[in-house]
Amino acid sequence: MKCIRAVLLLGIAVPIGSVQAQSAASGPQPNPITAALRGRTAGLRRNIAQAFDSIPESKFGYKPTPAQLSIGYIAQHVAEDNYFFCNNFGDKKATLPDEDTSTPDSVKAQWPREKLIAKLKESNNFCDAAMAQLDDGKLAETVTIHGPNNATREVPRANFVVGHALDLADHYSQLANYMRLNGILPPTALPRKPRSGN
């Protein structure tokens, strides 16, 4: 638990530091914690989308070992996780077609590349809209979680926002390794474009 807290604090403190540096020049920014989390998750979603865009369809069945997930499985899983986390950011809830909710994950993992990427992009768009509902005060609000045997408990909304960022980081790392094993550079390993004006 202490390790998780340390990771969460570091994940929030680093972006807050850069937000504070910007704020010194432009004045105080409203909702700096939410802004930092929004920026972090948007960047991770962008990296994942770029990764899938650069992986050819012939590799979507690839998995390093039989026990691991295929690239196609990861694509459908990330889209599903996006809805799980982002549905808990506020009143905005996703409405998914029956095909998405009733089809087994192992079958969705074999959908064509274009369909998987389209589903992922739809879930990213939903998360962007769901994140727009958040401010620093709403992070402390509680959300009711349903567990086994009809048990419920209340957890801070921040758990879902931070959990979303950690989940995205985990899956991007997974994809980056798969890409390297196939001789494909992940998006964050590509040479950076020079900034304009430099």
Image (cartoon, rainbow, N blue to C red):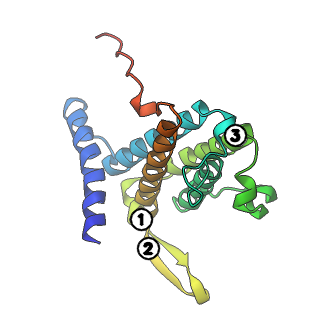
- Residue 164 spot, x, y in % from top left: 47, 56
Q: Mark 2 and mark 1 in contact? Answer it, CB < 8 Å.
A: yes
Query: Could you tell me residue 147's position as x and y percent?
Result: 56, 81
The residue that appears at 62% across and 56% down in the rendered structure is 80
Q: Look at discs 2 and 3 and give the one toward the viewer.
A: 3
Residue nearest the viewer, comparing 146 with 193: 193
* Residue 113 seen in render: yes
| Residue at 60%, 89% in the rendered image | 149
Image point 47% across, 30% down: which residue? 185
Q: Label 2 to label 3, Cα distance in Å? A: 32 Å
Circle 1/circle 3 CB separation < 8 Å: no
Q: How many marks?
A: 3
Q: Is residue 32 left or right of residue 53?
A: left
SS category of the residue bearing label 3: helix
Regarding mark 1 in the picture, which secondary structure is present there? helix
Q: Give the farthest residue toward the bottom.
A: 149
In the image, which disc is placed on residue 140? none
Q: Quadrant of the C terminus?
A: top left
| In front of the other: 180 or 43 | 180
Q: Where on the picture, by quarter, is residue 120?
A: top right
Q: Identify which amino acid the numbered label 2 is placed on.
A: Val
Which quarter shows the N terminus? Answer: bottom left
Whole-number angstrom distance, CA of label 2 to CA of label 1: 7 Å
Q: Residue furthest right?
A: 98
Q: Position of residue 135 (x, y in %)?
A: 41, 53
Local crowd size for mark 2, using a 10 Å CA cut-off: few (<14), some (14–19), many (≥20): some
Q: Is residue 136 left or right of residue 73?
A: left
Q: Residue furthest front?
A: 65
User: Which disc, if any, is residue 118?
Assistant: 3
Report which residue position mark 1 lands on.
159
Q: Amino acid at mark 3?
A: Ala
What numbered label is drawn on residue 155?
2
